[in-house]
Image (cartoon, grey):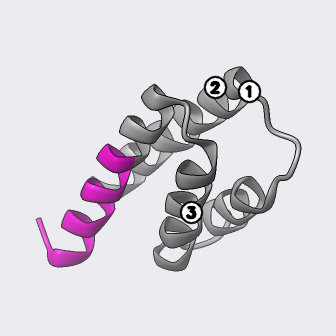
Amino acid sequence: MGSGNATIGRLCVSGDRACTSGDLPRLQGIAARLAELAAEPLHHELRAFAESTNLDPAQATCTWMRIRDRIARESV
């Protein structure tokens, strides 16, 4: 695994922890960092998630899990 993939992996684990603790601002910050590393269309999806201002915890968790699963599939 290259250093870029290791960074992505660490960010995904941090995102899972933020999700579990309900720390939406932290989760959005992690999504913004991941967006800097991702190619389109995932970049756009991560950026939109990071910039959302009306997320509730349940919606954020569902969105994060879907995005994280895509990251895992596309990083292999």
Question: Label 1 to label 2, Cα distance in Å?
Answer: 5 Å
Neighbour tally class for label 2: few under 14, some 14-19, many 20 plus, Cα within 10 Å: few
Relative horizontal placement of residue 1, taking residue 55 as reference (left or right): left
Identify the residue at the far top of this view: 58
Question: Label 3 to label 1, Cα distance in Å?
Answer: 16 Å
- Tell me the number on the disc at residue 19: none
* Element on which disc 3 rests: helix
- Magenta stretch encompasses residue 9: yes
* Predominant SS of the magenta segment: helix
Residue 69 x/y as whole percent: 45, 37
Identify the residue at the far right of this view: 54
- Marks 3 and 2 in Cβ contact (< 8 Å): no
* Element on which disc 1 rests: helix
Highlighted range, magenta: 1-14
Relative horizontal placement of residue 31, taking residue 6 as reference (left or right): right
- Tell me the number on the disc at residue 29: 3
Report the amino acid beneath label 2: Cys
**Rendering quarter of residue 5:** bottom left
Q: Nearer the viewer, residue 47 or 1?
A: 47
- Marks 1 and 2 in Cβ contact (< 8 Å): yes
Residue 75 x/y as whole percent: 33, 57
Front of the two marks 3 and 1: 3
* Element on which disc 2 rests: helix
Residue labelled with disc 2: 62
- Marks 3 and 1 in Cβ contact (< 8 Å): no
Report the amino acid beneath label 1: Gln
Question: Label 3 to label 2, Cα distance in Å?
Answer: 17 Å
Residue labelled with disc 1: 59
Quadrant the N terminus occupies: bottom left
